[in-house]
Image (tube, grey):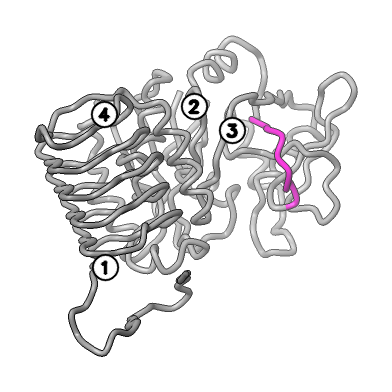
C-alpha cells in the first residue's frame, strides 16, 4: 500500500503568515504539520509516499524540508501539480506513481487524533474499494458532506452544500484501490472548475463499487485558519511527552506539563503547561502561560505570553501587556521602542490582524 499526501495549497486563509512559507510547514506543538502526517502514514506501515506539491517557492520549501524521507525511513516521491484543480485532479496527476496499488490519501494540513493505523488495517482486511473518514462538525457546509442511509451505507456525497444533508463531513483521509482511477477519468469539473474527490467517490458508489464510511469519534482539525491552528496546537500539546532537555535555573518555576527542548534556556521565568519551548530558545524574566508553543531560536525577555504560537528566530522583548491568543510568524521582532513621544508604530502586511486594548 502507498501513501499520497496533498501539499499543494497556497494557504490563503492563513495570510500573512503563509505569504512566504508553506502552510504545511507551520509547526503545531513545535513539529511541522506535514511531518506529523508523514509520521502517521509511516506508523500505519506505509513506506512509499508520494507528496503532491504545487509550483513556486512553497513547493521548493516543502521539497527542502522533507528531503528524500530518510529521517522517517520512508521513500518520498514528489509529484508536481501545475494548477490546484481539485483533489481528484491530484489523484489523476499521481496516477503514474500510484499504479494499481491501493493507497491512503491524506491532506497535508490536517491533524487527527489517534493516527490512521486502525483504518489502514480495516481497509486491508476487507473487500472495500474505498473507505472514507467522516466526523460530525457544526459547519459542514464548508466541506464535502455525506448523507448516510439508515443501514449506515452512503446515499450520496455533496461538495460544500449550501444546505447540508447531514453534519458528517469528510475529514481529508481516504483509502482507495485502483478503481479510483476509472472515476477520476470519468467525472467532469464541478461549477468551481475542479475535479472533486466527492464526485469521484460518488461515481464509485453509482457504479456498484464498495465505499465504506468510517465515522471518526476523536478530534480532528483542518488547520486552514489561525483559530484552527491554535486549537490544533492546544490538542497536540495535551498529548506530548513532557521532558526537560534544556537548562532551567533555580529561580525559575516550570510546571510538570512542560517540554523544554535541547539547547533552550529558562532564566528567572515561570512556565505553566501544557507548553513547549523549542531548541536554542531563551526565556528570560518572562511568563509563558498554558497552551503555548515557542519554536526554535526565539528570544522572550521581560514579556508574558499565553495560548499562543511563536515561530522560529523571533524576538519578543520588554512588552508590558500580556500577549494572548496570538500566532506570531518567523523572524518577527516585537519590542517597546524608546523613542518619545510615546506612540504605537506599526509596519503591517496585507491581511494582517491587530488587536489593541
Query: Horizontal placement of 289 versus 246: left or right?
Result: right
Residues under labels 1 and 2: Cα distance? Answer: 51 Å
Q: Mark 1 points at which residue?
A: 334
Tell which tag, 1 or 3, sits nearer the viewer. 1
Which sits earlier in the primary sequence, circle 4 or circle 2? 4
Q: Quadrant of residue 156?
A: top right
What is the number of the mark on residue 101? 2
Q: Do the residues labelled 4 and 2 touch (CB within 8 Å)?
A: no
Element assignment for label 4: helix
Q: Where is residue 222 in the image (x, y as percent from the top left)?
A: 55, 45
Residue at numbered disc 4: 72
Which residue extends farthest bottom?
A: 341
In the displayed image of the protein, which residue is found farthest to the right?
A: 150
Residue 357 located within the stretch drawn in magenta: no
Q: Which of 81 and 117 is in front in this view?
A: 117
Q: Nearer the viewer, residue 290 or 59?
A: 290
Write the residue at 64% across / 30% down: 133
Q: Earlier in the sequence, mark 1 or mark 3?
A: 3
Q: Disc 4 to disc 2, how far (Cα)? A: 21 Å
Q: What residue is drawn where x is 75% and y is 36%?
A: 168
Q: Which sits earlier in the primary sequence, circle 3 or circle 2? A: 2
Q: Marks 4 and 1: which is nearer the front?
A: 1
* Crowd rating for badge 2 (residues with CA inside 10 Å; few <14, some 14–19, many 20+): some
Report which residue position mark 3 lands on: 174
Which residue is at a point 33% across and 27% down the rendered structure image? 257
Range covered by the magenta-colored residues: 133-141
**Residue 134 included in the magenta stretch of the image:** yes
The structure residue drawn at horizontal position 47% and vertical position 61%, both measured from the top left corner, is 14
| As drawn, 103 above or below 189 | above
CA separation, marks 3 and 2?
14 Å
Amino acid at each position: 500500500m502507498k501513501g499520497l499526501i496533498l501539499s499543494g495549497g497556497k494557504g490563503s486563509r492563513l495570510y500573512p503568515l503563509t505569504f512566504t512559507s508553506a502552510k504545511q510547514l507551520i509547526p503545531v506543538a513545535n513539529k511541522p504539520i506535514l511531518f506529523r502526517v508523514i509520521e502517521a502514514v509511516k506508523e500505519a506501515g506505509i513506506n512509499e509516499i508520494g507528496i503532491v506539491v504545487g509550483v513556486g517557492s512553497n513547493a521548493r520549501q516543502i521539497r527542502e524540508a522533507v528531503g528524500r524521507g530518510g529521517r522517517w525511513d520512508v521513500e518520498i516521491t514528489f509529484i508536481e501539480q501545475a494548477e490546484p484543480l481539485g483533489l481528484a485532479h491530484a489523484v489523476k496527476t499521481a496516477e503514474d506513481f500510484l499504479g494499481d496499488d491501493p493507497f491512503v490519501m491524506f491532506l497535508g494540513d490536517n491533524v487527527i487524533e489517534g493516527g490512521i493505523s486502525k483504518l489502514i488495517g480495516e481497509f486491508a482486511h476487507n473487500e472495500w474499494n474505498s473507505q472514507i473518514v467522516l466526523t460530525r462538525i457544526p459547519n459542514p457546509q464548508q466541506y464535502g458532506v455525506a448523507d448516510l442511509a439508515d443501514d449506515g451505507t452512503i446515499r450520496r456525497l455533496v461538495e460544500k452544500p449550501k444546505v447540508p444533508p447531514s453534519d458528517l463531513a469528510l475529514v481529508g483521509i481516504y483509502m482507495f484501490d485502483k478503481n479510483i482511477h476509472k472515476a477520476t477519468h470519468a467525472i467532469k469539473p464541478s461549477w468551481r472548475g475542479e475535479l472533486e474527490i466527492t464526485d469521484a467517490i460518488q461515481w464509485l458508489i453509482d457504479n456498484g463499487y464498495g465505499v465504506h464510511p468510517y465515522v471518526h469519534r476523536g478530534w480532528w482539525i483542518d488547520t486552514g485558519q489561525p483559530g484552527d491552528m491554535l486549537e490544533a496546537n492546544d490538542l497536540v500539546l495535551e498529548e506530548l511527552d513532557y521532558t526537560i532537555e534544556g537548562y532551567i535555573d533555580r529561580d525559575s518555576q516550570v510546571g510538570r506539563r512542560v517540554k523544554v527542548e535541547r539547547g533552550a534556556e529558562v532564566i528567572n521565568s515561570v512556565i505553566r503547561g501544557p507548553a513547549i519551548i523549542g531548541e536554542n530558545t531563551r526565556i528570560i524574566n518572562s511568563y509563558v502561560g498554558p497552551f503555548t508553543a515557542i519554536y526554535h531560536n526565539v528570544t522572550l525577555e521581560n514579556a508574558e505570553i499565553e495560548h499562543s504560537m511563536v515561530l522560529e528566530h523571533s524576538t519578543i522583548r520588554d512588552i508590558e501587556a500580556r500577549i494572548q491568543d496570538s500566532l506570531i510568524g518567523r523572524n518577527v521582532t516585537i519590542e517597546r521602542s524608546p523613542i518619545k513621544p510615546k506612540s504605537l508604530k506599526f509596519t503591517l502586511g496585507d491581511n494582517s490582524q491587530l488587536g489593541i486594548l
